[in-house]
């Protein structure tokens, strides 16, 4: 050690000193958790030797995987996973966003009311919010409205945090309460339903076929993996996009710098306030997009939509190794965290545990992930 | 105003609420000159640096750089005007590596039309970092290591390499050797000598009398927020400087100041 630091060159890329990426640990954790569920399936008498993720008996899908369950796992985490992509960036700046679930609720109501169709089975839409002028609008209108709502709510968060210096916890808590209020006030608590076919197709249409012009319609990957999985596809595409942004662009670098040492970032000339506004705005926009997917999938919007999604999203990020102290974590980690989250939740269903227990355990997972993060932080602090 | 003055301040003052951290500082730095600022803890040395570098907004006073009056809105303005600073707090991002820190806030980029999402030129920054470290003879075992995993001395070296990698019109170092061992201190002093040879002006803040006497042309002493002495290195000695620092003496031209 002493020799290399005082030697002449000493600039070589020293592999031995390069830390094993945390994502590898998280992937191992994912595999271990799957194995635990598989073992329980074999050991618990009432499970009669069922497997969670494998299906050895019937080769009907051309795979030994239980594609039905895997699809459900991925689908379950996709919409909240999209929110977690934004929450990850917020946490990396050293902040927190408690408002995403409520932003989903408000955006769901508002965007859906611009997505309605005029005639339902030949009768006027019974749930119409606006007059005929807002019926059967081009698909881009409700999408722009939804993304715009998320963007505005997120920007308000960011502006409050950056320019009034109130803690992110408080600013986004306020938004959490207010945005839920907006969701309930919008249609006085009534659900909003009957969107145009195009709007319903955002989540339910055949996206891969659309994107690839039907070239792969018959292939295994389309029929077994992606069919009816549009939210999962959007999740993966957005994850790739934000992985790139966080790792290879100035936006990403400045986000990490702020979470690492905000004063240093400021002294280096980074516009810290503006960067924070952008990060919270992006997080809000992703929540808005999640609301579009959710309402499209359910072909209805309700004021309670997105309830406590923010906590699930934070849990996914923290399980994925994003440090609540800021500066550390990655999009890949969060995607793996989302998978772990999904495996655990659907593992409980597979073990036929009651939904009450699931909620209790979910709370435990969130706390455990934060404890793990604290432990990692202490270890990191010892090093410095 | 003559053009051989690199930096001039007039009545530079900073109050933090009731705390008069800096009071009426008149300061001049000539071309190619190396000046030390000394003074006890809390004397206002770092405060002086923060006003010049745009990190904080001064309460009062005026600043000229190379004859032009300047009003920096922030640290980036100061840096773009050619002032490179090693802050006492180092101002490094712990979770980023060496090239990231060297180029923080002034990244080499491609595809600039993407605005905030313009793409980082990692290879360019790595190469420039290696070249800069070699030029300044700063040794860091692995530039891909995050700052968190480095020793205090290595961190200091990174902060100094940052100022030395970029061509600057004025370099400011606030206690650059405070955390360093003998060998690393010698390394930093060599960088300072290189700057002197290159004719680049420098302000060095240090508590190390030997170092100051070795390196600089002139010594400015701060006491309780005020400048109390302006001493030529060749006409003073350590004891004399200490007398000014502790308040046993005050420069003739500063009588009544403190
Ligand atoms: N942000 C601030 N708010 C209030 N007071 C401050 C602030 N920064 C500095 N001070 C005060 O201003 C005075 C000068 O501080 P400064 O950091 O300039 O001292 P210094 O000469 O650099 O000391 P040292 O040798 O310990 O680095 C001190 O009394 C300090 O407590
Ligand atoms: Mg100081």
Image (cartoon, coloured by chain):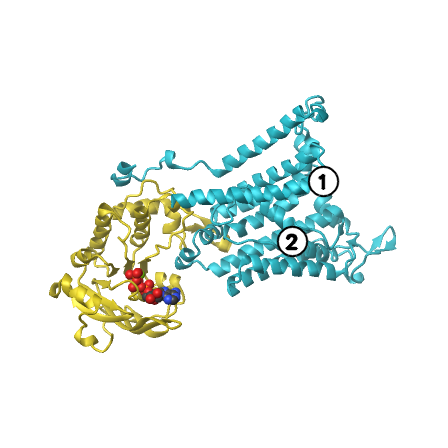
Chain colours: A cyan, B yellow
- Residue sitting farthest toward the bottom: B256
Crowd around label 2: few <14 · some 14–19 · many ≥20 (10 Å): many
Check the residue under mark 1 and report the chain it is in.
A
Q: Where is residue A72 drawn, in percent x and y?
A: 69, 37
Relative placement, left or right, of B194 versus A375 is left
Query: Which chain does the numbered disc 2 sit on?
Result: A
Q: CA distance from mark 1 to mark 2?
A: 28 Å
Secondary structure beneath disc 1?
helix
In front here: A136 or B238? B238
To which quarter of the image does residue A347 belong? top right
Q: Mark 2 — residue? A: A288
Q: Position of residue B21 (x, y in %)?
A: 33, 69
**Residue B177 vertical placement versus A347 (above, below):** below
Residue A160 pos. (x, y %): 55, 63
Residue most toward the top? A57
Q: Nearer the viewer, residue A224 or A321?
A: A321
Q: Are marks 1 and 2 in contact (CB under 8 Å)?
A: no
Residue at x 55%, y 53% (from the top left corner): A96
Is residue B54 visible to the viewer in this orientation of the structure?
Answer: no
Q: Residue furthest left?
A: B235
Q: Is residue A313 visible?
A: yes
Helix, strand or loop at mark 2: helix
Q: Is residue A196 left or right of residue B221?
A: right
**On the rendered structure, is B246 left or right of A325?**
left
Q: Is residue B159 above or below residue A61?
A: below
Position of residue A148 in the picture relative to residue B169 (left or right) = right
Number of the label disc, if any, that sits on residue A355: 1
Q: Earlier in the sequence, mark 1 or mark 2?
A: 2
* Residue A363 picture location, percent across and down: 63, 44
Q: Are both tags, 1 and 2, on one chain?
A: yes
């Amino acid at each position: 050690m002493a020799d290399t630091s005082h030697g002449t060159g000493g600039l070589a890329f020293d592999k031995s000193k390069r830390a094993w990426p945390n994502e590898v640990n998280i992937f191992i954790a994912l595999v271990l958790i799957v194995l635990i569920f598989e073992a329980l399936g074999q050991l618990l008498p009432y499970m009669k030797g069922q497997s969670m993720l494998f299906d050895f008996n019937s080769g009907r899908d051309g795979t030994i995987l239980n594609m039905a369950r895997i699809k459900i796992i991925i689908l379950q985490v996709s919409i909240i996973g999209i929110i977690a992509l934004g929450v990850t960036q917020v946490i990396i700046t050293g902040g927190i966003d408690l408002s995403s679930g409520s932003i989903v609720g408000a955006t769901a109501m508002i965007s859906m009311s611009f997505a309605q169709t005029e005639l339902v089975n030949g009768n006027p839409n019974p749930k119409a919010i606006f007059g005929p002028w807002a019926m059967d609008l081009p698909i881009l209108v409700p999408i722009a409205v939804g993304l715009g709502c998320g963007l505005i709510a997120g920007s308000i968060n960011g502006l409050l945090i950056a320019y009034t210096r109130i803690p992110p916890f408080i600013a986004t808590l306020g938004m959490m309460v207010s945005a839920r209020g907006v969701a309930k006030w919008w249609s006085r608590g009534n659900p909003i339903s009957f969107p145009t076919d195009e709007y319903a197709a955002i989540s339910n249409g055949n996206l891969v076929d659309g994107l690839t012009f039907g070239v792969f319609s018959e292939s295994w990957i389309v029929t077994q993996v992606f069919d009816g999985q549009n939210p999962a596809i959007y999740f993966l595409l957005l994850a790739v996009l934000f992985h790139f942004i966080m790792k290879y662009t100035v936006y990403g670098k400045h986000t990490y710098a702020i979470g690492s040492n905000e004063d240093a970032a400021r002294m280096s000339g980074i516009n810290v306030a503006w960067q924070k506004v952008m990060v919270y705005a992006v997080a809000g926009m992703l929540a808005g997009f999640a609301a579009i997917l959710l309402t499209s999938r359910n072909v209805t919007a309700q004021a309670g939509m997105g309830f406590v999604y923010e906590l699930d999203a934070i849990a996914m990020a923290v399980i994925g190794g994003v440090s609540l102290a800021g500066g550390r974590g990655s999009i890949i980690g969060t995607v793996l965290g989302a998978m772990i989250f999904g495996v655990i939740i659907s593992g409980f269903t597979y073990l036929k545990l009651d939904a009450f227990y699931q909620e209790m355990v979910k709370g435990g997972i969130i706390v455990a992930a934060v404890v793990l993060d604290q432990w990692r932080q202490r270890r990191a602090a010892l090093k410095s | 105003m003559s053009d051989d003055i690199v930096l001039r301040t007039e009545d530079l003052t900073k109050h933090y609420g009731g705390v008069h951290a800096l009071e009426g500082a008149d300061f001049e730095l000539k071309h190619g000159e190396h000046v030390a600022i000394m003074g006890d803890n809390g004397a206002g040395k770092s405060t002086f640096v923060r006003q010049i570098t745009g990190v904080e907004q001064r309460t009062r006073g005026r600043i000229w750089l190379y004859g032009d009056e300047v009003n920096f809105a922030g640290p980036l303005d100061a840096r773009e005007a050619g002032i490179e600073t090693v802050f006492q707090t180092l101002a490094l991002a712990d979770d980023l590596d060496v090239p990231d820190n060297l180029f923080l806030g002034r990244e080499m980029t491609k595809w600039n039309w993407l605005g905030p999402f313009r793409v980082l030129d990692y290879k360019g920054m790595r190469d420039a970092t290696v070249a800069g470290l070699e030029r300044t003879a700063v040794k860091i075992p692995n530039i891909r290591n995050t700052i968190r995993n480095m020793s205090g001395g290595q961190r200091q070296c990174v902060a100094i390499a940052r100022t030395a990698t970029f061509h600057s019109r004025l370099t400011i170092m606030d206690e650059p050797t405070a955390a360093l061992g003998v060998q690393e201190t010698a390394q930093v002093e060599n960088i300072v000598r290189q700057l002197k040879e290159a004719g680049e002006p420098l302000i060095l803040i240090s508590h190390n009398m030997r170092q100051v006497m070795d390196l600089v042309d002139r010594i400015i002493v701060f006491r309780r927020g005020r400048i109390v002495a302006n001493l030529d290195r060749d006409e003073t000695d350590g004891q004399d400087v200490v007398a000014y620092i502790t308040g046993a003496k005050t420069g003739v031209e500063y009588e009544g100041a403190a």
